[in-house]
């Protein structure tokens, strides 16, 4: 009964999304006040229906209803309750439900905040969000219905993929999707502005907090995914340039550019059409990511069962949405003129470089991700593109970006006036260089050329971002949250750069064959293998090893890697064991029984790798802080009052 | 400089930057892509000598050999028409098994043995890498000798 109710709720949600789209877009065009007034109830109704559908699916998982095909494929009666809930997004159909639920959530949030917007504009924003939601609901119902029944019902489920039975993975998709879907809000604001044919600084002020929050979620989501890949997949790295990782990284790069270009549009009324284009691009890349992952055209750990109909549907939807938005852009963008100018050394020019470099970075990632597909389509041979391509090309745009960052945040708007801060900047650069050399050559005593450069840039970025806040503090000026948030995010970036440079250069990894009682020296640590014993969990059995780590005779850590066999899927899964020591991440994975009493072990030592994820978290916190600045709320109220007064003057398109 | 000249300088600078980046990316791309070959293509000498490439096929039943206690492992990759012996000295991925699909990265030694530095198996039992699946289908079903074409972006790794 519940699954049928869920499906019925999804169908109702589809109808409501259609109404929301129609009234939201057509209402303002025809100037029908009552049509526009119907948009908000449609939003609320759609959210309730989607939440009901998601609730029904969760109930089917929790109640072990194996007559539902999706539950039977992705759950099992022995699966712990926590994973039965997170199994909702363990495969294709359920993750679409999650995507739609989050989109409905964002839409409700926009509708609540829309009281401060001019009503016509608000209706258009919600209307565009309705179109997006309609497309995804139709996709779900037409190609990926999660409520399909099995007849006869399965006796028990096929279980959740063992590598997905992990706490970090339980929260990774919701957070990542919140970021992905959040760019839909920026997209909707951009489309609404183009439909209005009018875009001013207040538009940027409305859009900024939404975009920044979405960006913060995306940052967190990517970091969580990287963390999960590091310890669960046992690959031992934190980033693999896997196509699906790239699919989330491209919208992040463009979203970062958007956050910065919005700042210029907000403060100076410049980069208007560029900002619109970035907003369209960021969400298009989010949808392209969905297409790449869901359609099965890319092979990756994330890709679910391939169904050609799904790929075609998403591609068609992508073409309609992106094509429509770009057509609107070509038609309306020429109307948006920026009148103000700026000097070469001004903050605007640095942000222009920031945008260009970030978009170049996204383009190189895009090229590398899609090259195998294109080469395949053109019958040029089967090729694969990996880190040897991505690392150098990515550095190519990141090095200038990071070098200009310290200058850019200290440049004034409109006129550069960097001369006033020349001394401070030189001092911070000098301090960064000395510190970097001390760290790289003092602690690690060796390194590639780029290591000290990277560490220096990271330290310089941190020091330079602190110049302005410290100056304000010294002169006891107020420190608005927008400035504080920006500083925190940039400090996070600096930390990330330091961590990345260090990890890349000073990682030690070795695969060893050890008998019980034997030890291996890796780096400055001794790993003594104490032997294996059987382990048993709620839905798996396996082998656990005990590895004692010492450094110069002093005990450091006890590591317990496991090799599990999950009963239902009979799939072997390695569970790595990780401990921190003096800033190093010690990782041990258990390999195979080699015979003669020896086992293979994979041992890796990565300095500062945890700092990468911590830094991403700091960046996300910075973004959230900045988005919560009072100026967005108070100014918004004032702007909408003036915009409301000026409304009769706006030409309807 | 007038504002116009300044703007032009900026535009020229950006265009130059983008072009340089594009050229460098293209050269990095040329040097760093790895192509996929199946055992029959290897046997017919299609692989440029000394080049690092991806070898894909099935692990032949009963071919997995290891001296007791040694990390070094030997197995044979087959497309049911030709075979290539492979040697690997790291931890094998969880899903590696005889009779299942595999993709190995590495180079061909002069004696015809493939020295792998990375062995990949997808994290799904039912899975066969599509490039392997298509190449097998072609070997068995047709005599067409077109270059192997398949999607190969990210068979995921458990190899070093």
Image (tube, rainbow, N blue to C red):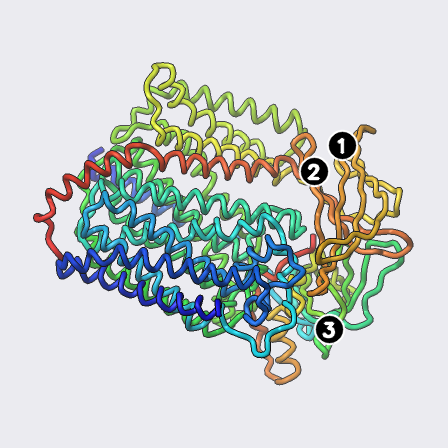
The residue under the point 23% across, 43% down is A116
Q: CA distance from mark 1 to mark 3?
A: 46 Å
**Is A450 or A71 nearer to us in this picture?**
A71
The residue under the point 69% across, 55% down is B159
Q: Is residue A529 left or right of residue A367?
A: right
Q: Is residue A121 left or right of residue B108?
A: left
Q: Does dot 1 land on a helix, a strand or a loop? A: strand
The residue under the point 67% across, 64% down is B103
Q: Residue furthest left?
A: A649
**Which image quarter is the C terminus of chain A in?**
bottom left
Identify the residue position indicated by label 3 in the image.
B78
The x and y percentages for residue A287 are 41, 59
**Same-chain check, marks 3 and 2:** no
Identify the residue position indicated by label 1 in the image.
A556
**Is B137 or A227 nearer to us in this picture?**
A227
Residue A483 is tagged as none
């Amino acid at each position: 009964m519940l699954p049928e109710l869920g499906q019925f709720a999804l169908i109702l949600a589809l109808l409501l999304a259609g109404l929301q789209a129609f009234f939201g877009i057509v209402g303002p065009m025809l100037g029908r006040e009552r049509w526009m007034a119907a948009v908000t109830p449609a939003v609320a109704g759609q959210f309730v229906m989607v939440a009901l559908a998601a609730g029904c699916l969760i109930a089917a998982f929790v109640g072990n209803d194996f007559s539902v095909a999706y539950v039977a494929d992705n759950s099992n009666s022995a699966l712990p309750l926590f994973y039965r809930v997170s199994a909702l997004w363990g495969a294709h159909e359920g993750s679409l439900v999650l995507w739609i639920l989050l989109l409905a959530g964002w839409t409700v949030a926009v509708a609540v905040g829309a009281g401060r917007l001019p009503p016509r504009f608000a209706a258009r924003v919600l209307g565009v969000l309705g179109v997006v939601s309609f497309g995804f609901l139709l996709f779900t119902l037409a190609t990926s219905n999660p409520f399909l029944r099995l007849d006869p019902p399965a006796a028990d489920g096929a279980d959740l993929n063992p590598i997905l039975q992990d706490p970090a993975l339980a929260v990774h998709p919701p957070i990542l999707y919140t970021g992905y879907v959040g760019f839909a809000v920026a997209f909707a604001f951009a489309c609404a502005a183009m439909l209005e044919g009018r875009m001013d600084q207040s538009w940027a002020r409305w859009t900024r907090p939404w975009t920044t929050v979405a960006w913060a979620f995306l940052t967190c989501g990517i970091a969580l995914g990287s963390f999960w890949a590091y310890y669960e997949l046992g690959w031992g790295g934190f980033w693999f340039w896997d196509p699906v990782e790239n699919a989330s990284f491209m919208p992040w790069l463009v979203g970062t550019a958007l956050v910065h270009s919005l700042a210029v549009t907000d403060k100076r009324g410049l980069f208007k059409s560029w900002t619109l284009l970035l907003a369209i691009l960021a969400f298009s890349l989010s949808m392209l990511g969905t297409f790449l992952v869901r359609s099965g055209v890319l092979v990756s750990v994330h890709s679910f069962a391939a169904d050609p109909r799904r790929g075609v549907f998403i591609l068609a939807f992508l073409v309609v949405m992106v094509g429509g938005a770009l057509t609107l852009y070509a038609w309306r963008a020429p109307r948006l003129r920026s009148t103000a100018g700026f000097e070469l050394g001004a903050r605007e020019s640095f942000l222009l470089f920031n945008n260009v470099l970030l978009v170049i970075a996204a383009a190189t990632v895009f090229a590398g991700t899609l090259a195998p597909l294109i080469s395949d389509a053109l019958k040029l041979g089967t090729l694969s593109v990996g880190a040897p391509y991505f690392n150098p090309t990515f550095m190519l745009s990141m090095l200038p970006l990071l070098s200009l960052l310290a200058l850019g945040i200290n440049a004034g708007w409109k006129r550069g006036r960097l001369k006033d801060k020349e001394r401070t900047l030189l001092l911070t650069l000098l301090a960064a260089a000395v510190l970097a050399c001390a760290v790289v050559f003092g602690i690690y005593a060796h390194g590639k050329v780029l290591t000290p450069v990277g560490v220096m840039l990271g330290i310089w970025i941190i020091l330079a971002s602190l110049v302005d806040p410290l100056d304000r503090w010294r002169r006891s000026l107020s420190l608005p949250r927008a400035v504080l948030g920006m500083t925190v995010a940039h400090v996070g970036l600096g930390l990330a750069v330091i961590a990345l440079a260090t990890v890349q250069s000073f990682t030690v990894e070795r695969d060893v064959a050890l008998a019980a009682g034997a030890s291996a020296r890796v780096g400055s640590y001794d790993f003594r293998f104490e032997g294996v014993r059987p382990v048993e969990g709620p839905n798996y059995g396996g082998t656990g090893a005990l590895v004692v780590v010492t450094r110069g005779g002093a005990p450091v850590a006890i590591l317990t890697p496991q090799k599990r066999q999950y009963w239902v899927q009979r799939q072997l899964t390695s569970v790595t064991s990780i401990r921190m020591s003096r800033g190093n991440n010690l990782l041990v994975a258990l390999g195979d029984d080699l015979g003669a009493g020896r086992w293979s072990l994979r041992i890796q030592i990565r300095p500062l790798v945890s700092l990468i994820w911590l830094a991403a978290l700091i960046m996300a916190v910075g973004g959230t802080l900045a988005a919560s600045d009072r100026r967005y709320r108070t100014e918004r109220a004032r702007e909408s009052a003036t915009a409301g007064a000026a409304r009769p003057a706006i030409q309807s398109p | 400089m007038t504002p116009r000249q300044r703007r032009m300088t900026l535009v020229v600078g950006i265009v130059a930057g983008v072009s340089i980046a594009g050229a460098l990316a293209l050269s990095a791309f040329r040097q760093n892509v790895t192509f996929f070959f199946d055992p029959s293509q290897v046997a017919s000498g299609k692989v440029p000598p000394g080049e690092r490439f991806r070898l894909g096929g099935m692990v032949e039943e009963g071919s997995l050999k290891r001296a007791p206690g040694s990390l070094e492992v030997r197995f044979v990759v087959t497309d049911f028409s030709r075979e290539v012996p492979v040697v690997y000295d790291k931890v094998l991925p969880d899903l590696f098994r005889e009779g299942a699909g595999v993709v190995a990265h590495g180079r061909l030694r002069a004696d015809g043995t493939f020295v792998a530095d990375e062995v990949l198996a997808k994290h799904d039992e039912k899975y066969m890498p599509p490039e392997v699946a298509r190449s097998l289908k072609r070997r068995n079903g047709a005599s067409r000798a077109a270059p192997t074409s398949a999607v190969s972006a990210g068979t995921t790794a458990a190899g070093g």
